[in-house]
Image (spheres, rainbow, N blue to C red):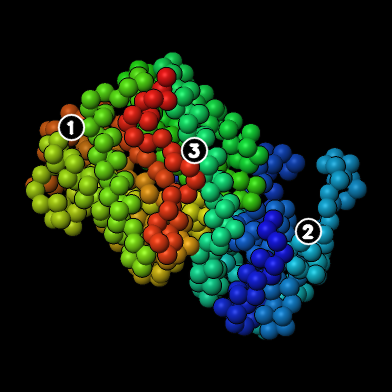
Amino acid sequence: MFQKDTYVERRKILKNKVGAGIILLFGNDESPMNYTDNTYHFRQDSTFMYYFGINHPGLAAVIDIDNNKEIIFGDDYTIDDIVWMGPQASIADKAALCGVKKVMPAKALGSALDKHKKVHFLPLYRPENKIKLFELLNVRPAAVLSSYSLDLVQAVVSQREIKSYEEIEQLHQAVNVSVDMHVAAMKYIRPGMTEAEVAAEIHKVALAAGGNISFPIIATINGQTLHNHYHGNTIKDGDLFLVDAGYENQMCYAGDLSSTIPVSKKFSPEQKEIYQITLSAHQAAIDALELGQPFKNAHMAACTAIFDGLKAMGFTKGSTSDALETGAHALFFPCGTGHMMGLDVHDMEDLGEVWVGYNGQPKSTQFGLKSLRLAKPLCAGHVFTIEPGIYFIPELIDLWMGQGKFREFINWDKVNSYRNFGGIRNEEDFVMTDKGACLLGKPKPKSIDEVEALRG
Ligand code: GLY
Ligand code: MN
């Protein structure tokens, strides 16, 4: 945990921002896999973690703004639990560490909610917490997304999106271990292994560092599938292997990196050419990062570099700006250049992308641009990823080619000849500062020479 004052100060700011009423924040419960005592890895709710720092299941908190009261609700382990689990700190001890003096049993939560006052709650995503909300306030699970407090969402986003110095330190550490996970994969992959063996090698580094992974590992020879969590293929000479994996440290801060690795130790000439375009797009996005300017500029810079690079190779043609306007480039890059990162790998995605990435402005509905999670002007303290890629997706090629789409921008015969090429992505993490964007963590090997050198 951070020092007590950090949490006291965060809650004080939250109370001022929300202004009046009662704030109700749920921590997460244990989540059973197949019976109650056989649970998944416990993950605390990130907003609860931000305001209270207690990484413990089964808690909720009430912040009564009008009466300036803060209470944590939860039940201490019994002697029966302790026989099986070993000694456990009391909830009162944990609450004291974040500056909360009052704790009450879980069943007392209802009595702390004055039904005549506005009760602010967040857009809950766990079924257990939706059920609790129903029992407390009679809000049906299906109604949560239409009745949460927008004031609370906006207040939380405005605080959590600006990372403090002590948070940046945590993020540097999480990214450093993430780099180690990627370097381990770069050294390890050999033809004949399964993708699962590589995923295990990556996971081992995260577990050995004392934390865990920040999202399910992507370790695949089918990198053209953006979020491919299948690990059942055997790796062959000539394959491109895409890794997208990050570390989550003990404080729940995330790293998120991607790498693309030549299984045959050296990239083929075709792989080198496309890889080099993704590096140009990566640098173009970084060069476009500017304090006070929209992150969307970085995305458009990456799209331009991808379209132009592919034009030089004969895949695309025509006016680049017209192609980007119509969305033709999304054939190769159907997603966004980056997203916020912090206590969540996609930071605060549970609170709504339109607030986290767009300051409440509507998102584009165009294929490709609609998947850009961050577009708004950058402030000092924003932490985000840069992850442009080039993907040859056979299903999308077949669909659009069959529809005769974008004939003025796409050379379909050339594209079709690369239909089994796969996908390439690199990803790094940055913090915006008053002096410009700074890389988080140590540099990840990314150039062709750096990656090939690690292939032994
Ligand atoms: N690294 C997973 C993602 O950015 O979606
Ligand atoms: Mn990412």
- Residue identified by numbered label 2: 94
Is residue 401 among what the camera can see? no
The image shows residue 408 at horizontal and vertical percentages of 8, 47
Q: Identify the secondary structure beneath mark 3.
A: helix
Residue placed at 26% from the left, 23% from the top?
268
Question: What separation in Å lies between label 1 and label 2 (alpha carbons)?
Answer: 59 Å
Pointer 1 or 3: first along the chain: 3
The image shows residue 217 at horizontal and vertical percentages of 50, 37
The image shows residue 246 at horizontal and vertical percentages of 51, 42
Q: Nearer the viewer, mark 1 or mark 2?
A: 2
Compared with residue 201, is residue 142 higher up or lower down, i.e. above or below?
below
Within-10-Å neighbours for mark 3: few <14, some 14–19, many 20+ = many
Question: What separation in Å lies between label 3 and label 2 (alpha carbons)?
Answer: 32 Å
Hey, what amino acid is under mark 1? Answer: Asn
Residue placed at 24% from the left, 39% from the top?
277
- Residue identified by numbered label 3: 179
- Residue identified by numbered label 1: 416
Hey, what amino acid is under mark 3? Answer: Val
Quarter of the image where the C terminus is located: top left
Pointer 3 or 2: first along the chain: 2
Question: What separation in Å lies between label 1 and label 3 (alpha carbons)?
Answer: 35 Å
Q: Identify the secondary structure beneath mark 1.
A: helix
Hey, what amino acid is under mark 2? Answer: Lys
Pointer 1 or 2: first along the chain: 2
